[in-house]
């Protein structure tokens, strides 16, 4: 589940959305004052490059430690600028060590980064002539989606459908906070959404909606006759050797994994509404350990588990054309402005991926947020340079917003020379 910086979403995710908004705003006007300046010799000598890398590593570690001091239970950072061994950093609060010793290669819930994978699967089927981006949703899900005759697969993928975001319906609160054991199916979610009016006419505007990808997942299963877990395994994880990447269908993890936390009700920030102040899970040190919670409404919009290293390999394969033919990759990178027609197209959403113009270069990225986990993955246009960070919570203090913005800006710049 990912909450976009320009659109008001579930209050419990406001913290990460605000952090992303600050970071992206800073990127538009120039690098933050704390962004490292890496010096290179004219001849690109190894000694100077090593010094620059050491400076970048020290800066990123300082930001990660600052975030922990500001209340984030754990932080993972990975940066691969394509010139050597990646920078990998893991910092955690002392009180979390009784649960788990955090490592940079731990599995995390990727949340809405899942959308990039779902879009890749759709575009693979387009290349195989089994789907078309112009297909109306009703062709595959007759009667299940409001305005299904007018909404195309492209509109689902780039969030121009106008569908209400199911995560904003109060009926989903127990599922989103870990208390509801019932697993919501795509059919149930789409039925719930049909009771909400459309936000706008299909194709008229842009608005991020997790419902779009619930419908995408249902189409994928209808067309292929395969489960989403099988499609991710057979078409993405296994061909690329992603040993720690899978589509979660329950609470079980498959390897070493980061623990995720939310503040307990007594220590939740005061601006969080009552319905999102109490999460299911073991309690200690003023927090709730939500690692074992399975958000039973997450599906094609947010279900994938992965690691920073695996995601780097995925981005590399995606952007280099190993997963998609050139025509379909070009479709993925065809964006619509997220801020409307009057807004400079600094932020553009493609098919399951976002383009952002930062102070150091144009990046392709996605953000993901579910209880206990906030993730950000970024790549350049070639997939040769990648970076990621993840936080072991979706609730940030005001100070952590600022430091998180600095970290996002820093890793965006660190992938470029």
Image: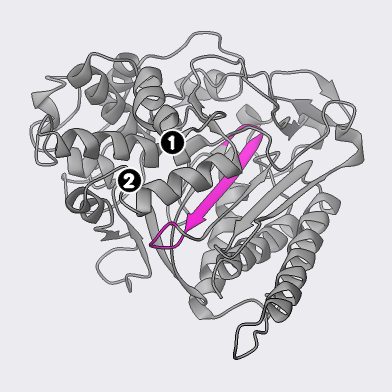
Say whether marks 1 and 2 touch (CB < 8 Å): yes
Q: Label 1 neighbourhood size at 10 Å, few (<14), some (14-19), many (20+)? A: some
In depth, the one of 337 and 259 nearer the eye is 259
Q: Which residue is mark 1?
A: 240
In depth, the one of 39 and 390 nearer the eye is 39
Q: Is residue 226 above or below residue 43?
A: above
**Is residue 147 found inside the magenta-colored segment of the image?**
no
Q: Label 2 neighbourhood size at 10 Å, few (<14), some (14-19), many (20+)? A: few
Q: Earlier in the sequence, mark 1 or mark 2?
A: 1
**Is residue 382 found inside the magenta-colored segment of the image?**
yes
Whole-percent x, y for residue 37 in the image: 68, 81
Q: Which residue is mark 2?
A: 322
Residue 78 is left or right of residue 382, and the answer is right
Q: Residue at position x 79%, y 18% from top?
A: 282
Instruction: Give the residue at the far top of this rendering.
Output: 182
The answer to which image quadrant residue 184 occupies is top left
For the C terminus, the image quarter is bottom right
Whole-percent x, y for residue 408 in the image: 61, 61
- The residues colored magenta run 370-383
Residue 340 is left or right of residue 390, and the answer is left
Which type of secondary structure does the marked residue at label 2 adopt?
loop
Q: Residue at position x 37%, y 14% from top?
A: 185
In the image, which disc is placed on residue 232?
Answer: none
Whole-percent x, y for residue 357 in the image: 43, 71
């Amino acid at each position: 589940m990912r909450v976009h910086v320009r659109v008001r979403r579930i209050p419990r995710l406001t913290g990460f959305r605000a952090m992303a908004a600050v970071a992206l705003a800073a990127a538009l006007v120039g690098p933050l004052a704390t962004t490292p300046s890496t010096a290179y010799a004219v001849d690109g000598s190894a000694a100077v490059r090593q010094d620059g890398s050491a400076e970048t590593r020290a800066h990123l570690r300082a930001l990660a430690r600052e975030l922990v001091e500001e209340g984030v239970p754990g932080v993972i950072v990975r940066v691969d600028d394509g010139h050597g061994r990646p920078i990998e950093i893991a910092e955690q609060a002392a009180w979390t060590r009784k649960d788990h010793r955090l490592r940079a290669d731990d599995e995390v819930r990727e949340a809405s980064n899942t959308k990039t994978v779902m879009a890749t699967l759709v575009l693979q089927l387009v290349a195989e002539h089994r789907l078309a981006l112009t297909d109306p949703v009703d062709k595959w899900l007759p009667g299940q989606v409001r305005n299904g005759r007018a909404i195309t697969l492209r509109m689902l993928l780039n969030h121009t459908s106008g569908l209400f975001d199911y995560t904003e319906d109060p009926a989903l609160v127990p599922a989103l906070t870990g208390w509801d054991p019932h697993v919501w199916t795509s059919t149930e979610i789409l039925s719930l959404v049909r009771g909400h009016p459309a936000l706008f006419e299909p194709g008229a505007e842009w608005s991020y909606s997790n419902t779009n990808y619930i419908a995408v997942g249902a189409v994928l299963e209808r067309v292929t006759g395969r489960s989403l877990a099988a499609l991710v395994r057979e078409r993405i994880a296994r061909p690329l050797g992603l040993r720690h990447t899978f589509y979660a269908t329950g609470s079980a993890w498959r390897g070493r994994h980061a623990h995720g936390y939310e503040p307990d009700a007594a220590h939740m920030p005061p601006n969080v509404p009552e319905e999102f102040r109490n999460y299911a899970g073991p309690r200690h040190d003023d927090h709730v350990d939500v690692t074992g919670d399975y958000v039973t409404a997450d599906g094609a919009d947010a279900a994938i588990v992965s690691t920073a290293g695996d995601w780097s390999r995925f981005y590399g394969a995606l952007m280099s054309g190993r997963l998609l033919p050139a025509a379909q990759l070009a479709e993925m990178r065809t964006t619509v402005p997220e801020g409307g027609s009057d807004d400079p197209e600094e932020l553009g959403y493609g098919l399951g991926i976002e383009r952002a113009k930062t102070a150091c270069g144009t990046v392709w990225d996605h953000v993901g947020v579910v209880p206990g986990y906030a993730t950000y993955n970024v790549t350049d246009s070639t997939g040769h340079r990648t970076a990621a960070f993840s936080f072991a919570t979706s609730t940030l203090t005001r100070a952590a917003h600022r430091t998180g913005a600095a970290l996002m800006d820093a890793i965006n710049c660190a992938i470029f020379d």
